[in-house]
Amino acid sequence: MKAYKWVLEVVFYIAMIVIVPWGLKVLFSKVKKKMDLKENDAGYLLEDAIAIPLKIIAGIFLGAFLFDLLVKYFGIEEKVFSIIPLRNAAVIACLTWSALRWKKIFRRAAIARGQMGKPSLRLESIELLDKFFTVFVVFISLLFILQIFGFNIAPLVTFGGIGAAALGFASKDIITNLYGGLMIHMTRPFTINDMIDLPQKKILGSVEEIGWYFTTIRNAEKRPVYVPNSIFSTEYLTNISRMTHYCIEEKISFHVDDLGKVETLVDKVRRLLASHPGIDSSQGIEVYITTLNERSIGLNMKVYAFVTPYEKFIKIKESILLKIGRLSEEAGAGIQV
């Protein structure tokens, strides 16, 4: 019976490759129906994250076992390297790949929940956790693999402190940009899709991506501008998307002969702005005659609109100017160009 023990082991590994994925598929199919899981739910895709890596791990053990069996059959154990370290390293690599697959599934599910209005992490937090998890898992896996192959990782970790100082000095710009990216994720002066303005660099546009090294901004010409993250630590910026109001400030000139008509017009413009639903009267409504000379009368208007999207603001401004134009036309006050 012992002579045929290897046959049982081969059958066991083949069964693992065939039966386990099938069993998981049946199990997850029942769970999906019972819990009414949708494609955007994390549990819906866990079957792929578990079944495929398990199948590959079973295949790794089967291949290693068959290799070891052939080596023993031909009696060349002393001439061939041991397959065990390579097998174990392959299993660690497979588990790392599986963990990254899990991360991708949960990331997709978290983003989908946020888009559907369900409680979820902010997109920037998801991106930050995604990067940290990837670096952590890969780093730990590399340490395990080095230890499997006989490397003593203790001196490596100790030397890392000295090496990090030397590397940090040599790559100062890289470190400052990485630190800048971390501070953006933590302090959140802007988020993806925000409109920001860097006046010192003459950059105005919408934030498309916040990376570790640089941030991508799409400017008015629809060109991507890649800004190193260290810039945001040394220069001030304006987040236009977080404005509470838009200021409407205009100067209108009338003919000096229409002075009496302009007096009446000023009161009508004030009432128009005070009753307009898009104007915040609590911020003050300034409509005054500020200049008067032999040729024209200067009327200054300054109010604040509630809305912050530029498209809505410009429509409100357009409607107000058109109504002022009609009021001046009804009053018989000629606007001077």
Image: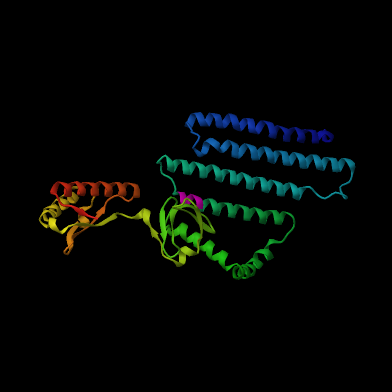
Q: Residue furthest left?
A: 260
Residue range (magenta) = 123-127
Assign the C terminus to one quadrant of the image: bottom left
Q: Is residue 159 left or right of residue 199?
A: right
Closer to the camera, 205 or 54? Answer: 205
Q: Mainly helix, strand or loop, the magenta region?
A: helix
Residue 223 position in % (x across, y down): 49, 52
Assign the N terminus to one quadrant of the image: top right
Q: Is residue 210 left or right of residue 79?
A: left
Q: How is the image coloured?
A: rainbow
Q: Residue at x 59, y 40 (%)?
A: 49
Closer to the camera, 7 or 218? Answer: 218
Residue 290 position in % (x across, y down): 18, 63
Q: Is residue 83 left or right of residue 296?
A: right
Closer to the camera, 253 or 205? Answer: 253
Closer to the camera, 49 or 2? Answer: 49
The answer to whether residue 308 is seen in the rendering is yes
Q: Quadrant of residue 70?
A: top right
Q: Residue at x 72, y 48 (%)?
A: 88
Q: Is residue 260 left or right of residue 206?
A: left
Q: Is residue 130 above or below residue 154?
A: above
Q: Is residue 240 above or below residue 23?
A: below
Q: Quadrant of residue 256?
A: bottom left
Q: Is residue 159 above or below residue 319?
A: below
- Is residue 150 highlighted in magenta? no
Q: Residue at x 13, y 57 (%)?
A: 257
Residue 131 position in % (x across, y down): 55, 53
Q: How many marks?
A: 0
The answer to whether residue 309 is seen in the rendering is no
Residue 53 position in % (x across, y down): 65, 40
